[in-house]
Image (cartoon, helix red, strand yellow):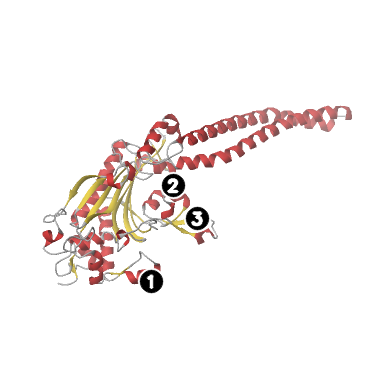
């Protein structure tokens, strides 16, 4: 959520931000509702102050009149009654006016809040303009020695690549048929060494963040209330991607949803709290099962392990002071962790600066990480895929957008409460990361070499398949 005060003071900043993000927002309607809401609140405040003043002023008078009535004769009683009714009618009249204003506010405020939630976080000034992911700009890339994604896989390795679909079938790592039988399309069963490799990637990344990068390990719910999804910015836009637990309405009465990322639980942890500044930055890491409906996805991306409904992800989240320079530095640090992990796994990758049209509602800046996947892309003259980049990570800066919606604040050295700045970054997501792991490390004999950092998590095994 944006700051309503900041919107009033500089509406053009938010109008321009929405334009750059290609988001349509009825700003004139929002301004009108904001003015109406402020007018009602001002009038209500004045009425309540008047009610308090009159109550203090006439309270003693009413008490005296009631006392006088007890001892008054018939002739005086009529006059005292009239005076008492006149005094008692004053607060009743004010109460009726206040109730009318409260009714008006109850009609205006939900509309105001709904429109306020529809205003995107303005992109950072240095984010390039663009309509969609096609306008993203490559920042840099890395490849292990002896491997060049610009060359055909056969030129790098001396043989044509198998796709991950062929590898998991031949090596018995994934059972798609039984996954579909149990749960429908885009579900799967990890089997044997496929499950071990999946767990090895997650455990290695999680341990790396805790032991080498100093993040605090957390285990958070993957079933959350609607308020948590709204607070983290995944609702109202993106609601169609979430699984809604209908039966959760029974008993407690709360709507519950399955989260699509551990970020939701990590950020929701401190909703409606004021944290002492000495505790900042908060650096949390979790591994959780994630659920996404992937509504609208179609084509080749829906085949195999690339775009699925259920997966596991190691996520890192940082909440720092409301300082742009500090937020930018943490963005670099979080990405550095990802690059260190990918380089240790010898996976070619590139970093992309996302353009304004690809940032989404809540991000002021975002960098995507893509790994080279030899089994993706169109088939070449030899009938083998030419390879393509596939997104595996994203790293986002959100300024105070998320913390404001969650009412997550810190108390600074001067005693002021300030909304923190939030960042999040995928550390590793599996089984999608298995695609480059299997395809890059496949051997001519059909086996797959296990990267050295993962071997301790797989009982010391060095490869999967033929020797």
Q: Which residue lies furthest to the right in this view?
A: 74
Viewport quadrant of the N terminus: top left
CA gap between label 2 and label 1 equals 36 Å
In this rendering, position of residue 2 left or right of residue 127: right
Q: Say the numbered circle drawn on residue 81.
A: none
Query: Which residue is identified by label 2?
Result: 231
Q: Say the numbered circle drawn on residue 255.
A: 3
CA gap between label 3 and label 1 equals 29 Å
**Earlier-in-chain disc, 2 versus 1:** 1
Q: In this view, does 412 lie above or below 214?
A: above
Q: In this view, does 61 lie above or below 356?
A: above
State if disc 3 and disc 2 touch (CB < 8 Å).
no
Q: Where is residue 460 in the image (x, y as percent from the top left)?
A: 19, 67
The secondary structure type at the circle numbered 1 is: helix
Which residue does the image show at 38% across and 44% down from the upper left? 362
Viewport quadrant of the C terminus: bottom left
Mark 2 crowdedness (10 Å alpha carbons): few <14, some 14-19, many ≥20: many
Q: Position of residue 330 (x, y in %)?
A: 28, 43
Query: Which residue is identified by label 1?
Result: 181
């Amino acid at each position: 959520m944006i700051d309503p005060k900041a919107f009033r003071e500089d509406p053009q900043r938010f109008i321009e931000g929405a334009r750059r993000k290609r988001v349509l927002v009825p700003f004139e309607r929002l301004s009108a509702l904001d003015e109406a809401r402020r007018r009602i609140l001002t009038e209500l405040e004045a009425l309540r102050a008047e009610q308090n003043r009159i109550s203090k002023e006439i309270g003693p008078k009413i008490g005296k009149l009631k006392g006088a009535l007890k001892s008054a004769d018939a002739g005086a009683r009529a006059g005292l009654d009239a005076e008492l009714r006149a005094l008692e009618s004053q607060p009743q009249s004010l109460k009726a006016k206040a109730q009318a204003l409260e009714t008006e506010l109850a009609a205006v405020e939900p509309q105001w809040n709904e429109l306020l939630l529809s205003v995107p976080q303005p992109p950072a000034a240095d984010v390039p303009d663009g309509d969609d992911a096609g306008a993203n700009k490559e920042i840099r890339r890395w490849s292990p020695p002896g491997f060049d994604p610009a060359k055909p896989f056969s030129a790098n390795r001396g043989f044509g690549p198998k796709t991950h679909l062929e590898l998991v079938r031949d090596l018995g790592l994934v059972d798609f048929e039984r996954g579909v039988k149990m749960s429908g399309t885009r579900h799967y069963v990890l089997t044997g060494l496929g499950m071990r490799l999946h767990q090895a990637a997650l455990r290695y990344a999680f341990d790396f963040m805790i032991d080498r990068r100093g993040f605090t390990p957390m285990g958070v719910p993957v079933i959350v209330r609607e308020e948590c999804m709204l607070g983290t910015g995944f609702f109202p836009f993106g609601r169609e991607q979430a699984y809604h637990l209908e039966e959760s309405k029974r008993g407690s009465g709360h709507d519950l949803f399955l989260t699509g990322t551990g970020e939701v639980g990590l950020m929701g942890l401190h909703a409606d709290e004021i944290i002492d500044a000495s505790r900042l930055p908060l650096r949390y890491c979790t591994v959780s099962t994630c659920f996404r409906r992937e509504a609208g996805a179609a084509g080749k991306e829906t085949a195999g392990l690339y775009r699925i409904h259920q997966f596991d992800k190691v996520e890192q989240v940082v909440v720092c002071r409301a300082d742009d320079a500090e937020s930018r530095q943490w963005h670099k640090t979080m990405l550095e962790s990802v690059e260190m992990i990918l380089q240790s796994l010898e996976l070619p990758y590139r970093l992309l600066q996302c353009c304004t049209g690809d940032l989404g509602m809540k991000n002021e800046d975002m960098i995507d990480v893509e790994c080279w996947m030899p089994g993706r892309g169109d088939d070449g003259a030899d009938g083998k895929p030419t390879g393509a980049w596939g997104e595996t990570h994203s790293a986002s800066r959100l300024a105070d957008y998320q913390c404001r919606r969650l009412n997550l604040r810190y108390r600074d050295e001067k005693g002021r409460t300030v909304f923190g700045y939030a960042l999040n970054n995928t550390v590793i997501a599996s089984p999608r990361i298995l695609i480059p792991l299997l395809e890059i490390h496949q051997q001519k004999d059909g086996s797959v070499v296990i990267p050295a950092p993962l071997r301790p998590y797989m009982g010391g095994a060095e490869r999967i398949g033929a020797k």
